[in-house]
Amino acid sequence: MIKVNDEFTKQFIKEEDLSKKIVEIHKMIHNKTGKGNDFLGWLSQPNISIQELERLKAASRKIRKESTVLVVIGIGGSYLGAKAGIELLTDPYKKDFEVIFAGYHMSDKMTSSLLSYLEDKDFSINVISKSGTTTEPAIAFRLFMNLLVKKYGKKADERIYITTDPKDGALRGIAISKNYPRFTIPKDIGGRFSVLTAVGLLPMAVAGIDIDEILNGAKKAYKDLLNEHNSAYDYAALRYKLYKAGKDIEILVSYDPRFEYLKKWWIQLFGESEGKDGKGLYVSNATFSTDLHSLGQMIQDGKRNLFETVIKVKEEEKDTIIPYSENNLDGLNYLEGKALSEINNKAFLGTLIAHNEGNVPNIIIEIEKVDAYNFGYLVYFFFKAVAMSAYLLDVNPFNQPGVEEYKRNMFALLGKKGYEDLANELKKKLK
Ligand code: PA5
């Protein structure tokens, strides 16, 4: 279960009754009558058939048997969710299997380093692209495929797994012609809503995460958030009211660096779903207490146009206990016997009050604990919240027309066929 605490937000918002609007939007979501309604496949859970799940588990066992590294190639919604789950749910220092992400950037050096690192490793590839035409992963596929062929010759094909659209796209064509194992991203699920499909589940299964538990958490969230009064809508309503009150920057905060990619995934989910038609909250993130030593000053004392949403974990581990020191030279004996998580919690409470008194509203999202079940729950909670939130702003939550702009320019500058006129225009501008 997730609790949304508005105790540190209330004083900053004008009480506006949104309940009628929320009921209307709720009906619009569930009756699939709103903008972008053909992308609501994620709404009911699970999004994967038992057969596909079994195939996926068998593939993950095969990958783990034949390789020590899985290279996951994808960008945006085709990598952030899996990376979020793996960073949050696996031990950062003890890995019994390496999952490495590629194709989410075009850094020459990072790519060549990875290619050289893989030269003496047994590795497999999972290429993920809904459209099957995105440039960054397409280039990475060619490069890593090249290395696979060099290493394994004809047997290279046995190490390639494709996750793509069930009906369209170049990647699907490649998978069919080469007979690669193929997993599908349902037509009605967009990239940033796809982590609970093979997109997220295959890499997470290979990393050793209990994906059944992720799906159980998502199913529970689906049931808990099914009616018109639910915590995901409470969160959406709060951020909408804060936006109306001039707080148009939201910082998602965690007190644990393991949430780093969960927050990056959330940034894509909310930023890409809401930032259109001149509207939307600018979404950002911070890890405390780390970033209190960099962003803390700005949050406490800078321009008063931001608010924080804190992910608070109710049942924290208590593994690291502060030891007694004979000479107490560091003066820390007053902390002796305390768990590091208890100290972290005091940092949270102290920061909450300080920032709140500095006129920074704080929404607190409390999750039970860090495990696969709660990850699945939280992911679905944010899906439901962003649909409500974007519809409150009256924008289509499920498209991303703005993302196409840079791609057209890049293709033109690269000399891709069909972009000649644009290339001439751009060249004049760049002079
Ligand atoms: O949410 C989305 O649909 C996008 O951000 C995509 O995830 C991203 O652009 C990658 O696209 P694709 O999976 O088609 O390669």
Image (cartoon, grey):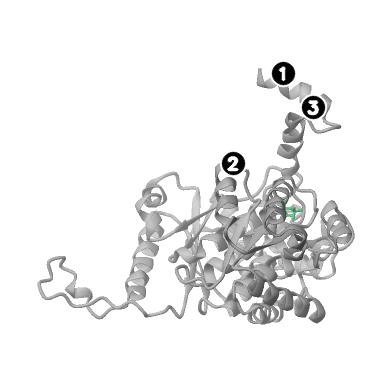
- Residue at 83% x, 24% y is 421
The picture quadrant where one finds residue 165 is: bottom right
Among the two numbered marks 3 and 2 on one chain, the one whose residue lies closer to the N terminus: 2
Q: Is residue 359 left or right of residue 246?
A: left
Viewer-nearest residue: 74 or 233: 74
Distance in Å between CA atoms under marks 3 and 1? 10 Å
Distance in Å between CA atoms under marks 2 and 1? 27 Å
Residue 26, given in percent of the width and then of the height, sits at 76, 69
Let me know if residue 266 appears in the view: no
Q: In the rendered view of the protein, which quadrant contains the C terminus?
A: top right
Rate crowding at label 1 as few (under 14), some (14 to 19) or many (20 or more) other CA atoms within 10 Å. Answer: few
Q: Which of the labelled discs sits on residue 422, or is there none?
A: 3
Q: Which of the labelled discs sits on residue 271, or is there none?
A: none
- Residue at 53% x, 51% y is 247
The picture quadrant where one finds residue 63 is: bottom right
What secondary structure is marked by label 1? helix
The picture quadrant where one finds residue 334 is: bottom left
Rate crowding at label 3 as few (under 14), some (14 to 19) or many (20 or more) other CA atoms within 10 Å. Answer: some
Is 46 situated above or below 394? below
Q: Which residue, given by chain and number where applicable, does mark 2 sit on?
A: 108
What secondary structure is marked by label 3? helix
Distance in Å between CA atoms under marks 3 and 2? 26 Å
Closer mark to the observer between disc 3 and disc 2 = 2
Q: Which residue, given by chain and number where applicable, does mark 1 sit on?
A: 428
Viewer-nearest residue: 172 or 307: 172
Closer mark to the observer between disc 2 and disc 1 = 2
Viewer-nearest residue: 195 or 25: 195
Amino acid carrying label 3: it is: Leu
Q: Are marks 3 and 2 in contact (CB under 8 Å)?
A: no
What secondary structure is marked by label 2? helix
Q: Are marks 3 and 1 in contact (CB under 8 Å)?
A: no
- Residue at 33% x, 73% y is 340
